[in-house]
Image (cartoon, helix red, strand yellow):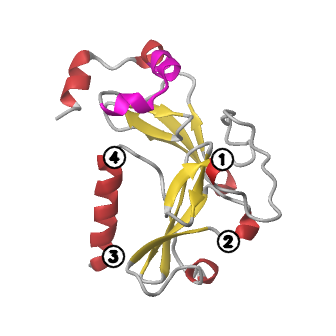
Amino acid sequence: MEDRTIFTIITVAIVSQCILANVEYLSGDKREYNALCPNSTRYAVVSLPPQLCDARGYIMCWEGVAKAINRCGINERFNNATGWCDAASNVPLPSGCVNNQTANRYPVSCLEQGATYVAMNSTCKKYTLCMPGGYNYTMTCPLPSYFVPAKERCIYAFAPFLDDIPPETFADCQAKDAYTAEQLRSGRR
């Protein structure tokens, strides 16, 4: 019961900040990740193992057990010192890792190496979630939000969240598949 409580609190906190992301929940025995989780705290977040060279990924721990893996947005890296996502320029890559990601280059297909979220061409209200093994899922953003490739998440299309959507992305989304004024008003309740 306590596990559900903490994840409900985390979900509410994430949604309240309009950071709507997909989390990979872990099942089965993940000893390599459990070893990184501190036993002394109920909830903690820690970096993925450095040998994975995934500075964007982090592990969500509950009482010393790895429960989920999440990722920071494009051009961000997980800062283990603060426990938050930070600008990539503020967080060095793990030793021996090379940054091969081009700035502001977003994947256009799940076949691209490292693709997790891919924007759809016809609408910003949906995106593709790329999973290992070639399993890809069409995901729908909550009403009224748009998928923003630069943030790799859905962001509400009204103030104060609208400031997080680059103006050119918002204009493109409005041109593709605009929300009505009524939909925007009903989403602000």
The numbered mark at residue 17 is: 4
59 above or below 119?
below
SS at mark 2? loop
Q: Earlier in the sequence, mark 3 or mark 1?
A: 3
CA–CA distance in space, label 1 to label 4 = 23 Å
Residue under label 3: 3
Residue type for callout 4 = Gln
Residues marked 2 and 4 touching at CB (< 8 Å): no
Tell me if mark 2 has few (under 14), some (14-19) or many (20+) residues whose alpha carbon lies within 10 angstroms of its own. Answer: some
CA–CA distance in space, label 3 to label 2 = 24 Å
Residue 37 at x, y = what percent? Answer: 53, 79
What residue is shown at x 78% (from left), y 49% (from top)?
99
Residue type for callout 2 = Pro
Residues marked 1 and 4 touching at CB (< 8 Å): no
Foreground residue among 79 and 56: 79
Residue type for callout 1 = Ser
Tell me if mark 4 has few (under 14), some (14-19) or many (20+) residues whose alpha carbon lies within 10 angstroms of its own. Answer: few
Q: Is residue 29 left or right of residue 178?
A: right
CA–CA distance in space, label 1 to label 2 = 20 Å
* Snapshot quadrant of residue 110: top right
Q: Earlier in the sequence, mark 1 or mark 4?
A: 4
CA–CA distance in space, label 3 to label 1 = 35 Å
Mark whose residue sits in front, 1 or 4:
1
What residue is shown at x 26% (from left), y 78% (from top)?
1
Residue under label 2: 49
The numbered mark at residue 103 is: none
* Snapshot quadrant of residue 101: top right
Residues marked 3 and 2 touching at CB (< 8 Å): no
Residue under label 1: 89
Magenta highlight on residue 130 = no
